[in-house]
Image: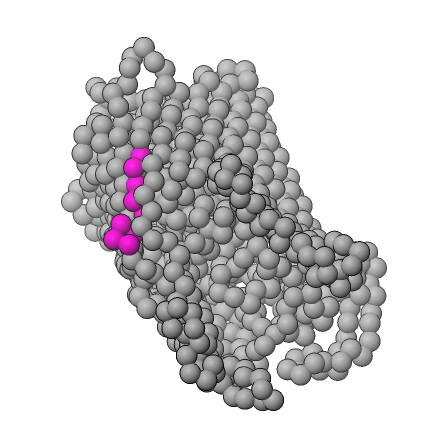
Amino acid sequence: MIRSLSFVFFVLISIQALSQEKVTLNGYVRDVSNGEELIGVTVYIPQMKAGTMTNPYGFYSLTLPKGTYEVQFSYVGYSAQTVTVNLQGNTERNIDMLGESTMMQEVVVSDKRVDENVVQLQMSKNTLDMNRVRKLPALFGEVDIIKNIQMLPGVITAGEGTSSFYVRGGSADQNLILIDEAPIYDPSHLFGLFSVFNADVIKDSELYKGGIPARFGGRLSSILEVRTKDGNNKQLSGSAGIGTMASRLMIEGPIKKDKSSFIISARRSYVDLFLRAANNDNLVHFYDVNAKLNWRHNNNNRFFAAFYSGRDVFNFGDQFGFAWGNRTATFRWNHLFNDRLFSNTSVILSNFDYKLELKDPVQGFKWTSNLEELSVKNDLSYFINTNNDLTFGYHITGRRFSPGRISPNTEASMFKEINLQHMFAIDHALYISNQQRVSEKITLDYGLRLSIFQNVGSTDLYLYNDPQNNSRPVRTDTVHYGAWKNIKTYVNLEPRAAIRYMLADGQSLKASYNRMVQNTHLVAAGTVPVPFNTWNPSGYYLTPQLADQVALGYFRNLRDNTLEFSAEAYYKDMKNVTDFADNANIFFNQDLSTEFRQGKSWSYGLELMLNKKEGKLTGSVGYTWSKTMRKVPGVNGGMEFPANYDRRHVLNIQAAYDYSPRWTFGATFTYSTGRPVTVPTGKFEYENYHPDVITERNGYRLPVFHRLDLSATYSPKKNDNRRWKGSWVFSVYNAYNRQNPFTIYTRVTKNKDGDIIGDGYTKEARMIYLFPILPSVTYNIKF
């Protein structure tokens, strides 16, 4: 590792020596109205036919020969700017851009822009435009980026009522979900009716499905990176919303104008308040809080502190209750070493926990579990010249897995206290990558990530005579490992590469390859991850999961850059994917490692996307054809079977129409073929016991899924004497009342009155449906 870092700095010093005749232009690009740094702004110099983009912290740097240049700054939704710079020495130039929300009528946004869809190197990446997302229909009127992500090509959902999503054949636990760099292990509220992301505080969100940059790791399928706003450092402002099921409030403003700022938001559902008022003991609610502080000491040093806390609580009278939640904290320091070398250092805390309680005098118990994580990261960007941007860094993460503790909650309880062992792991990563502009037509991105994973003590390791035997294995020995003693180490290299080749104007071809390594495994028996599934590290019995993905794409602009079209094909090969043996016992099992089975999975597909971002009518049409299969020894008789989130055809349509300055209408439509499920194919009798016979894993498919949602937003004319502005959002979820099947189960055949028909042994399949037509109204305020 030390040798690798020494080599990196040797390269930097060598390049610096070769380019001393040049000078550097750098700075930050910000929103003029609130001081927020803008991510991904295109900085282009026509004379050089070269440029760059602002990094995730709004910083840019260009090294050029001395001279006078016109520098163009362009960003979707902002007025393009051109500045003239006489570059005779290293120069700092910060740019304030005028956004849609602050434009006067006489300001015209340039309709001639460099279209990132074609020009940028990155493929298999989607950036959500929050202004556009807010115009689309939302369940119970609550804008949810997860629901919008589920509408993207290559992304599949298990159905309604879940925030889980599946990307290019990967399972839900193979998505890394980040908020201000901190991982979120369960992104759902109320079992997926809402997500943990409050749209009022979101600054930027990006989903990487392939061609994943080397700075990311730890998951096989995708990276969802969500960044929250830094807070308005110009003036005090805020927003609020009162909805059908939840309300929210956000306030932001300067601590010291242009120097430091804050933002805080809170959201809570109030179904429990109505139920309590009706003397109903079944109380259900969720809440979450976001907060952030930032301080700009000078242009070379800036500090951030971001916090998130969210929780769901379910209480069903004196019967049972459960709760789960995420808490994160991120402390970040941005430092500019010189005109070209930018550093971000982060200390990150994350905690996910859940609790379950059965309130019964005899069968009562409490069950608690959690996963704690502490990370330290240092990411550096070195802007070598207009043709090379180098990024490198080191990450270290420590995790403590507490899979479960069960204890009696009454003296008469039949349960005894059981503590499943804590598990500990240390994850190291060292990476380096370079984005190189070879010519006007060809741009490359290549890099390497080194993953070193250590499963460590303190713990007792159980040894078995045959751990993979489907009958009950027998323990043969126990080996104790003290604190921090190494149990198992895995070292993996993760190469990454991407290329973009420009064709005629407005067209390009792109290709990418990435290897991903995942050292954590979700212990889940069902299709949809619920909070009561637990995580395990790789170790003595579990091998890290690996994925190799290649993708090829064609990108083209139509009608003078007003329409974007893309077509991407991919193939993903996954090794050591984790499943469970048939009839596995996964709850409070001290010998859980004997229930794991690891095999292979493969997925391939085609994704088509047509996107319209400008004009009164905006929207997108996306189509995905894909196939995902698995083959795991000890599962399904060792034969291959479709993954339980395998949907062959998915069509998604989104549209928003600005009818007038007062009214905006939105619609979304989704259609997908049914997902596979496992159902009994027969039964047999044994001593008056009639168990089901299951002959095939995921051998039956549910009916097709389709749904239409509608919305209308009314914005009354603003009173110039009032600072605040209100709007009404009316929405209808499942407009034509489609009964979409969520899952299927079998029961003894009964008539419509609930009486058993026949001998009581014949069974029938029954569908479970979740949501009928659901109208909602929300009142939003900005001030």
The image's colour scheme reads one colour
Q: Is residue 190 visible?
A: yes
Please identify the quarter of the rendering in which residue 587 is found: bottom right
147 up-or-down from 631: above or below: above
Q: Which residue is drawn at 21% across and 46% down?
A: 563
198 up-or-down from 724: above or below: below
- Magenta residue span: 729-737
Residue 142 image point, x, y percent: 40, 40
Residue 748 is left or right of residue 364, and the answer is left
Q: Is residue 441 visible?
A: no
Q: Residue at x 58, y 50 (%)?
A: 316
Residue 322 image point, x, y percent: 61, 51
Residue 641 image point, x, y percent: 45, 77
Q: What residue occupies the far top of the structure in this picture?
A: 721
Q: Residue at x 52, y 66 (%)?
A: 526
Nearest the eye: 531 or 20? 531
Q: Is residue 736 magenta?
A: yes
Q: Residue at x 38, y 24 (%)?
A: 782
